[in-house]
Image (cartoon, rainbow, N blue to C red):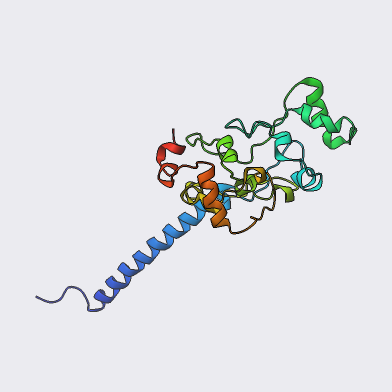
Amino acid sequence: MSQIFHHSSNTLARITIFGAVFILAFTAWVAEEFFRGAWSTRASQIREQPVPFSHAHHVGGLGLDCRYCHTTVETSSFANIPPTKTCMNCHSQIWSTSPTLEPVRASFRTGNSIQWTRVNDLPDFVYFNHSIHINKGVGCETCHGRVDRMSLTWQENNLQMDWCINCHRHPDQYVRPREAVTTMGYHPAGDQEAIGRRLVQEYHIQDPRVLTSCSTCHR
């Protein structure tokens, strides 16, 4: 019986098989980069707000502590958005006629809240408690970045699960003294690993096996 396929078919088959493997690998890489990239996670993208609030001015310039506005961050799962009255504590005297701040004054007059756009927004199936992290020595900038340099606020990190898990696996690399949780540009006074190991014990931080359990974040 005569040969049906030409000898070159073997070479073509090998090239096709190897090519398919590389194409699949490349496709998987592109998909991973897409879902982890800024377009999908919106990391590093500035959010437009009804009032162009500058953390760089208020935190970096004036030195306001995060807790002046986010008053519940140490006691609640939610770091509250400050009421308009907090803004008016200063702006009834400073820049009191600025057109940019008219939405703030209108909110104060009418009692209607300003509709801020949320910057860091986790999925509904993720449980995150600000007070636990603050009281265990996780600094604001660890998650939110150097807000004292943000004229307009953006999401610093992708907030995907592997990013959270990395910290939960190695809390000693990230924790700091509680009195420094709101410090921007924090530098440990010594070796971070040694300080971290001590604080993990002192603050009774759970074992990584517990911290990485599914039920810790998905309840």
Q: Is residue 4 left or right of residue 166?
A: left
Is 68 drawn above or below residue 37 in the view shown?
Answer: above
Is 134 drawn above or below residue 34 in the view shown?
Answer: above
Pick the residue in front: 208 or 93: 208
Where residue 147 sits in the image (x, y, percent)?
Answer: 70, 47
| Number of marks in picture | 0
Choose top left, top right, bottom left or bottom right for residue 10.
Answer: bottom left
Residue visible at 71% across and 31% down in the picture: 82
Pick the residue in front: 20 or 189: 189
Query: Quadrant of the image for the C terminus?
Result: top left
Choose top left, top right, bottom left or bottom right for residue 63.
Answer: top right
Residue visible at 72% across and 26% down in the picture: 113
Where residue 205 sits in the image (x, y, percent)?
Answer: 50, 42
Where residue 75 sits in the image (x, y, percent)?
Answer: 61, 30
Residue visible at 51% across and 49% down in the picture: 171
Q: Is residue 81 left or right of residue 26?
A: right
Residue visible at 71% across and 39% down in the picture: 66
Choose top left, top right, bottom left or bottom right for residue 212.
Answer: top left
Q: Is residue 124 left or right of residue 2?
A: right
Query: Quadrant of the image for the N terminus?
Result: bottom left
Where residue 61 sits in the image (x, y, percent)?
Answer: 81, 47
Extreme residue toward the left, this view: 1
Pick the residue in front: 208 or 16: 208
Extreme residue toward the top, this view: 110
Extreme residue toward the bottom, this view: 7
